Structures are given as structure tokens and as C-alpha cells.
Amino acid sequence: MKPQNFEQKNLAIRRKFLTLKKAHPERLRARLNLSWSNWGFGIEPLADSARRLERHGIRFIELHGNRYGPDLGYDAAGARRVLGDHGLRVAGICGMFSADNDLSSPRGIIRQNAVDYIRRNLALGREAGAGYFLVVPGAVGRPRKSDDSEFHRSVETLRRVADAFAEAGLKAAVEPIRSAEVSFCHTVRDALDYIAAVAHPAVQHINGDVYHMQSEEAHIAEAVLLAGKRLTNLHLADSNRCALGEGALDLDTLIMALYLLGYNREGCYVTPEPLGPGGDPYPAMFGRPDPRRLDELVRKTAACWREREEAVRGLSAASAR
């Protein structure tokens, strides 16, 4: 029986991976850097989150970009102290862009909110030792376009604050999000076009998300390869946006694609963000979580990721037939 199109693509990636493994085994020596995005933990104290991640062997964290105003958000020195006590380093800052701080808004006061929000959270990232700050070009939770100029307003607004990324030493990582949640910038190709339009050396990277990719891309692993060296963080959740291993996501082919990119290096992270099924997930960031549910979410996801990574690393040439 002839393989389906996605199976043919999977097989091509598998063959390339096995060729790499045979010719350059040293490129598989390092494991992929497993992080975790903590905004889905809601208003839980950072120390509780850090203990949970340490318990499950996770060494990096993507901090909630929660400096929504001058009197809100993490104290970086205190956060670093708490994280250091549990062997955690800050991978990046998860920028949260809603209708209140929409880079593409037709209202100038909202775009100014976005600029101010970015500046405050870049300061957090610099103080906390982060490597990237996640940027969403349009508001999450607003899937309908405001007008035909939102792309251009977003580009112009981000360009105004782009120098601040360079000054803070953080990469701007543009995240494509599914069309059920945002009005534009849905695919890796869209993110590349957006980056080209901003045309600034500090705005050159991509934050991928496999949950959004399964809705918008023809093939998740191919989209990862298209992002290439621009990819600096990849959010993970299974096909149902739950813990890894609870859905139908093809983790093995994804892991092969990441090794083909040389993604197992400093400054590149795979970051679970299993937020559960549904529409706009942003309300979860200020909810009271169930610690037992979160413990199980992290345990299952970390165990599944490590199991599949080891299985992929152990593949033999016979598996490419």
C-alpha cells in the first residue's frame, strides 16, 4: 500500500536523520534542552513551580512576562534566587499580547501599551538572564481582523522598540498562532515575512508552537525545518493541547527534525505549554491551579519527552526501510 503524503514526508526526515547519525554521531551527543512555560501554572507562587520542575528534572523555565505595569510582575533578583535554589535557569520570557497591548491595534494608546509592556519585560529578561522574549504580532483572543492595515501597524510598532531588544541582549522570537486565536501571522512562512518586514537585526527569531502548527501547517516537522536556525524556542503540547503522550502528536519525527537542525545547542529550547483544549487560553494565567493536576501534567510530559528522545536516538538504519 502506498504511504500517505505525511508518511512519505516522515520517512524522508527519518532517512536524513539516520544519515546524520551515521556520518556525524557527535552531533547527537547533547540532548535537547527541556524547559517549561510557567504562565499556565496561574497564580501559583514561583517557589512552588520551581520545586515541581526540579522534582521532574527540568532545568530551564520560560517565565511569564507578567510586568503588566510598573507595580506588577516578578522582582528579577528574587526570582533568580528562587530559581537558583532549585537548579533552574531562565530560558526566556513569554510575552503575553492581548487586546490590551496589541501591537497591531488601530488605537494608538493600545500600541503604546504594547511598547511599554515590551520595555518592562525586556528589563525583566535582562535582569533574569533570559535569552529571548516572545512576540505575538496581533492580539491573542481576537481572531477577526480589525482592518486591512494591522500587519503594517504591528511591523511599524515593533520596529519602534526593536533597538531595546538589542540593548537588553534578548532575541525577539515571533510566534505564529492558529487562526482560531489571532487574526494574522499563523504559519512559519508568515513569521518569516513579518520578520523581513520589520527588517531589524534584533528581530530575527521564531518561537514555534506545535499545537498551532498542527492547525496551520501541512507538516509540523517540515515547518520546523523551514524555521531553521531562526527557531530559538518550541512550545510543546499534544494534539489535544494536553500532556505529551495523551494525544496523537508524532513526537519522533519532530525530534528527528530538531536534531537535523542542530537544535541540541545552547540557546535553543523545547518548552511544554500544555494548556488544555478550548479557545482563548489566556484566562488561565490568573486562575488558581490544582497543584496535583499540575504535578501530573509535568510528570507525564517530561517522562514522555525523554522516552521518545531516547527511542529516536537509538534508531537503527533498518528502521528507515
Image (tube, rainbow, N blue to C red):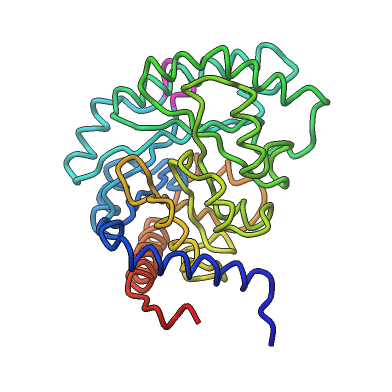
Residue furthest front in the image: 23
**Magenta stretch mostly in which secondary structure?**
loop
Camera-side residue: 260 or 252? Answer: 260
Residue 248 in the image: x percent, y percent?
57, 71
The structure residue drawn at horizontal position 41% and vertical position 33%, both measured from the top left corner, is: 93
Residue 223 in the image: x percent, y percent?
59, 52
Camera-side residue: 104 or 259? Answer: 259
Residue 199 in the image: x percent, y percent?
58, 21
Residue 267 in the image: x percent, y percent?
34, 40
Left or right placement of residue 77 versus residue 309 in this view: left
The structure residue drawn at horizontal position 59% and vertical position 29%, both measured from the top left corner, is: 195
Residue 10 among those drawn in magenta: no
Camera-side residue: 59 or 78? Answer: 59
Q: Is residue 92 above or below residue 319?
A: above
Residue furthest left in the image: 85
* Number of numbered discs: 0
Q: What stretch is highlighted in magenta?
A: 67-72
Q: Is residue 52 above or below residue 208?
A: below
The structure residue drawn at horizontal position 63% and vertical position 58%, both measured from the top left corner, is: 214
Left or right placement of residue 267 versus residue 117 in this view: left
Residue furthest right in the image: 147
Quadrant where the N terminus lies?
bottom right
Q: In this view, does 321 lie above or below 124?
A: below
Camera-side residue: 119 or 66? Answer: 119
Q: Image quarter for residue 149?
A: top right
Q: Image quarter for residue 194?
A: top right
